[in-house]
Amino acid sequence: MKLNATVIRLLIVVGPLIWALHWVWNTDVRPEKVSLAIAAVIGAVTTIYALFTYEILLQNQKMASAAFASTKLMEQNLRFSHSPNLFYKTISTKDPNFDPTKHIFPINNDDYKLALSVFGEGGVEREFVFAIISNKGRGAATNLTVDTIYNVINNSSTTREATLNKRAAVPILEPNSAVALCIFITKIPTPGDRVTLVSASLIAGDFYRDSIKESPQTIKIKPTIHQVEPETNCVVLLA
């Protein structure tokens, strides 16, 4: 049978004390012996008291460590259940009207209103480029801010090359939902047209972060690995 650390420490302390008391008891009875016995008893009691105090401190430390680990685990589980998981991609399409069953909701700014107006004019050639920000996490993203820059080559425009800076703010982006930010519109697309991501950043909080007044999370999108999804009938090149 294995002895635990507490028993071993107790034996290490009590063993020598018993030997010391036995030695004192078997010495000649003199005033010095009485004083020595009293001192030995006081020392024994003090040592045993110190040992028990040390054991109590060890147990309190173990309980505090266990309570801290439990609290940390609960905090991680609570944070995970409220955390969004944001993804960014660029798409091209012939139709700016997104199917609501796919839970993609366009940001209704001036650019999107212009896209609807161009689409309403008819014509099969026009194309639209959107940035799609989707939330695949378990919690909602709050106070989402999108800031993105694209370089555009448009051969049908008098200004062939341009840099477009698009910004948007979304109060809440629910899980399994996405928002679409209009980036580029062309009525006469050509094979030489190109839309290239320069930089993009997403800043968002969540209900847990907001409740503890923690700073929102910033996500930088790397242009070299960002996802593009052109429709098969679109000619504008995405990069």
Image (tube, rainbow, N blue to C red):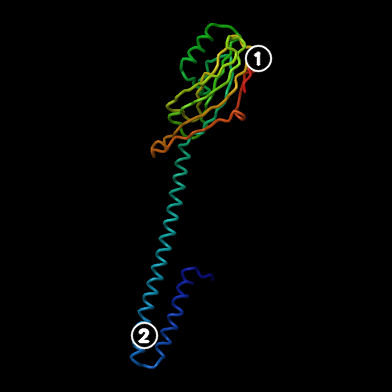
- Kindly identify the residue that appears in the image at 60 percent across and 19 percent down: 195
| Mark 1 / mark 2, whichever is N-terminal | 2
Looking at the rendered structure, the secondary structure element under dot 1 is: loop
- Kindly identify the residue that appears in the image at 45 percent across and 40 percent down: 79
Q: In front here: 162 or 42?
A: 162
Horizontal side, residue 112 vs residue 194: left or right: left
Local packing at callout 1 (Cα closer than 10 Å; few below 14, some 14-19, many 20+) is: few
Instruction: Tell me which amino acid carries mark 1.
Output: Gly
Q: In front here: 235 or 18?
A: 235
Q: Is 167 placed above or below 14 here?
A: above
Residue identifier under label 1: 192
Instruction: Tell me which amino acid carries mark 2.
Output: Ala
Q: Is 210 placed above or below 43 here?
A: above
Residue 94 in percent (x, y) is at 58, 14
Residue identifier under label 2: 37
Local packing at callout 2 (Cα closer than 10 Å; few below 14, some 14-19, many 20+) is: some
